[in-house]
Amino acid sequence: MALRKAGSVLVIFLWSVAVVLGQDGWSVTYTTQSICALKGSTVKLTCSYSYPRGHKFTSTFWFTKMETEDIGQDPEHAGRLEYHGNKKKDCTLRITDLRESDSATYWFRLLTDQEGGIYTGKLGMTLSVTGLQVKVTGGNQDKTLTCSTTCTLTDNPTYIWYKNGQHLDESTSPQYKDPVSSNYDDSYSCAVKGHEDLRSPAVCVQGQRCSRVTYTKRRICVLKGSTVDISCIYVGYYYTTSSFWFRSDKSTPEDLTRDPENTGRVEYTGTYEGPFTLRITDLREEDSAEYRFTFKTNYFEWGHSFPGTTLSVIGLQVKVTPAAEGQKTLTCSTTCTLTDNPNPTYIWYKNGQRLDEPATQQYSSNTLVVLGHYADSYSCTVEHHEDLHSPAVYAPKNTSVSVSPSGEIVEGSSVTLTCSSDANPPVDKYTWYKKNGASLTGSEKTFLITNINSEDSGEYYCEAESIYGSLNSSSVSVNIQYGPKNTSVSVSPSGGIVEGGSVTLTCSSDANPPVDKYTWYKKNVTSPKASGQSYSITNISSEDRGEYYCEAQNGRGSMNSTALMIIVADGPKNTSVSVSPSGGIVEDSSVTLTCSSDANPPVDKYTWYKKNVTSPKASGQSYSITNISSEDRGEYYCEAHNGRGSMNSTALMIIVAEKQTSVITAAVGIIVVVLGVILASCLSGLMWFRKKVSETTSDTRHTADNGQGDSSPVYDNISGMAMTSTAEQTAATVNQDDVHYASVHFSRSKNQEVPLYSTVQLCKPRKQEEDVQYDAVKFNCPSAANRPTAAQAAEDSSEIYSRVNKPRRPEHNKPRTKRT
């Protein structure tokens, strides 16, 4: 008594503190002050709370007794309480399978980490639990029926009436609207809509012998695999002819014993006016249903709409919740309270081995705290049902990845990866990875790659994670087929390529399947050069220079590489000299010689030489001679040089013409030329005549060395200079066999600087024997003081042609010359 009084004082103190603290931010607000609920139903006690800033709550709970004990610790509420609130302001409590003993006043308590930080709602919430009863009032002929409760039900319920097990009417009034007769055979019952299974017991309107069915239990919760007995007591005013059990979810009542699915599992026991029992063995989850009983007499059949007994077949489950770091809390639970064992003793198993040997309190509770050894599995059961284990909980295992489509994957298509894992509780999170890469976007069981390309090739794996643990799968390869890409050509050696050496070109390409054919091409050349991944060129020359490329091909396509330039290093070639101006070269004028040469690397040094002169004349690609004089005449050539060698050009003869003094001199020169041409024509005619005479006297003669004659020009050089002797001219001609002449110039006057003729072309001879060539003709007319006498002129007239080249003949075939 003293303890109870102390408790009351303590609560009053807390209420007084709550009022004061409430002004500073403390509060607990209940949605309603009282609730009236049906026995066997479920109720929610709803409230909200708040607390001042700076506080942090440590725990919340509901209590009903003055000692402020958490009702969650009361064995009578085990398995029937659920806190639906959150950690902010909701404090809703849910109670299932209400019993009359649950009627009480409930308070909510909040505890924080601050001193004095305790608060309890001021008034609390009163819960009343009631059952339904039918009260019969009135006389013998007119009876009134009332569906009564011990408290007024919340939410203005709708009442349902049954007569002899058959649905009659619905009304918001607890009284049946029509008068009832005093038939001894009739019975009545009521229920509340939404809680039809919580109907009142059936009552007789007249006497106690009316037809009725009374079920022993309205709800039964049993374990899957166990056996259940569902029983009732039935009374008939007349003799019973048949009776059976049926499921209410069937469209028409069917005797359970005739259902093939129940063969060997269903049987009836009991008699009339005694418990008539339905026994079902080896219970399955699909056996969960409402079971009703019906019977027949010669004049009567019990209605089919009267609620019966609701059977729930459940299995034990282990729930996993996080505990301290590295730990998990396992809870063995059911979805409803076991009817035959509301407060069971729990038994735990680790990897199939029982943990309560020796028995301890830890292993008889419905909770078990375990370390994070996720390789272990745990299960539970209850005493007297040791063979009915819960499914074991374990971290994900057998995690694997499958690929669809499973065949060839072509670039541009779509691929779906699926992660599969065996886990209990089931996997709630998937994470995808690409090997040697970061995690991929996506946390679903499947991972879709659209418009897939070669960059997506690789190995993929997933991580399957449940609240109990996680496990990675082994990797699976995604092999994407595509045509050649990134095709390129490399060369070896990579340095300079020297003429005469060897070079190897190699073609590289990214392709899947690998490239099966390589073809080599040279730019601007139609036909292929070679095939194979490598192409070798031996004894390379300048003709091999150019751009080369390859074509890579597989079953998915082909691709050409970019062209690679092959440059062959060699010494100068085709070295030659050109002159500017290309016409006559006159004293005091200027001339430029230019050296050209084909070389790789390019010529880096040009040197100029004059024939028969030891030292070089100049350097550079061009050589210019200004104010040219007769002393500059001669043969010039150049030397081209690079890192690979050097080469001389052929010599170019530079002939310098003197300036003409007057127009008269030029005219005299023209006359001399004309006379020379006439004289040459006469001489040619004479020679032709002599030749014809010789041919007629010896028709059978043949030239023995017909092909051995001198094919060089008949006249290499003719220089008609007045003051030059024939011998000197002949000597000059002999020494100038290989000399090139840039021009032929006839000079008459010092005042005439432009050559009259820059080129002389001779007509082709008509006959082989007349093969006479004239390379150059130059006539210089001396001044009057230096002109030769007439005798000298006649004497020198034969020197107009200094050399005649004719085919040789054998001595014995020489024609006889007739002297005159």
Image: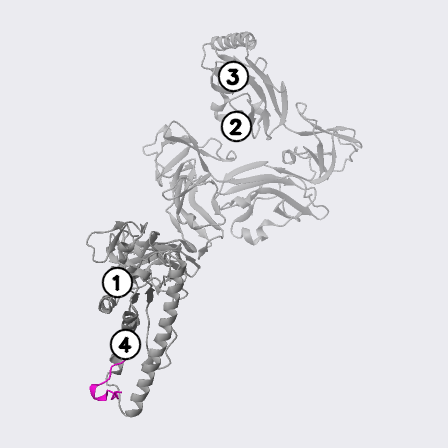
For label 3, count other residues whose C-alpha is less than 10 Å away and answer few (under 14), some (14-19) or many (20+). some
The Cα–Cα distance between marks 2 and 3, rounded to whole angstroms, is 16 Å
The Cα–Cα distance between marks 4 and 3, rounded to whole angstroms, is 143 Å
From the viewer's perspective, is the residue at label 4 or at label 3 nearer? 4
Q: Which residue is mark 2?
A: 82
Residue range corresponding to the magenta coloring: 805-820
Q: Amino acid at mark 2?
A: Glu
N-terminal of the two: label 4 or label 3? 3
Any mark on residue 539, and which? 1
From the viewer's perspective, is the residue at label 1 or at label 3 nearer? 1
Q: Amino acid at mark 4?
A: Asn
N-terminal of the two: label 4 or label 1? 1
684 left or right of 272 in image = left
Q: Amino acid at mark 1?
A: Asn
**Residue 243 part of the magenta segment:** no
Element at badge 3? strand
Closest to the observer, 431 or 581: 581
The residue at 37%/71% (across/down) is: 675
Provide residue 751's location: percent of width, then percent of height: 39, 56
Residue 760 vertical placement versus 34 (above, below): below
N-terminal of the two: label 1 or label 2? 2
From the viewer's perspective, is the residue at label 1 or at label 2 nearer? 1
Q: Amino acid at mark 3?
A: Arg
Q: Which residue is mark 3?
A: 109
Q: How many marks?
A: 4
